[in-house]
Each structure stands twice: as C-alpha cells, then as structure tokens.
Image (cartoon, rainbow, N blue to C red):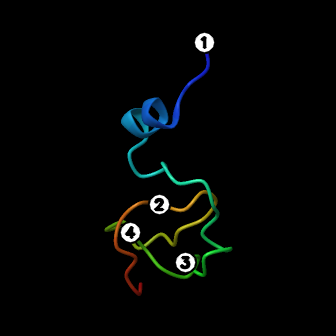
Amino acid sequence: MSATMTDHADKHPTRARSDTAANLGLDTKVTRTDTVTDSGTVDIGYHYEP
C-alpha cells in the first residue's frame, strides 16, 4: 500500500507540498520560530523574512 499525499500531510503537516523552496523563491524565507530558512520540499504556511 502506498502513502497518499493526505497520509504524508497528516504525518508531516509542514512538508505536504510537492515543489522545492528554491524553485518557488522561498529558500531565503522562514516558516519556523527558530529562523531556519526553508529548504527541500516547500513548507506550508506563511514565509517570513528571517
């Protein structure tokens, strides 16, 4: 049985999109309170300036 996007989103709610942060121009932005910039699969949520 393969995992669906919903299964993935339930287990990893901030990693539910399919494109990369760099491709979307969001790799210099943050979604976390520890100011680590977004990388890899783009995070869900508002992307702030660090």
| Mark 2 / mark 3, whichever is N-terminal | 3
Q: CA distance from mark 2 to mark 3?
A: 9 Å
From the image, tell me which residue sits under label 3: 26
Q: Secondary structure at mark 3?
A: loop
Q: Which residue is mark 4?
A: 31
In the rendered image, which quarter contains the C terminus? bottom left
Residue 10: image x %, image y %?
Answer: 37, 34
Residue 38 horizontal/vertical position (percent): 53, 68
The front one of 44 and 33 is 44
- As helix, strand or loop, the secondary structure at mark 1 comes to loop
Q: Earlier in the sequence, mark 3 or mark 1?
A: 1
Q: Which residue is mark 2?
A: 43
Mark 1, residue position: 1
10 Å crowding of disc 2: few (<14), some (14-19), many (20+): many
Local SS, label 4: loop
Of label 3 and label 4, which has the lower sequence position?
A: 3
Residue 25 rendering spot, x and y as whole percentages: 60, 81
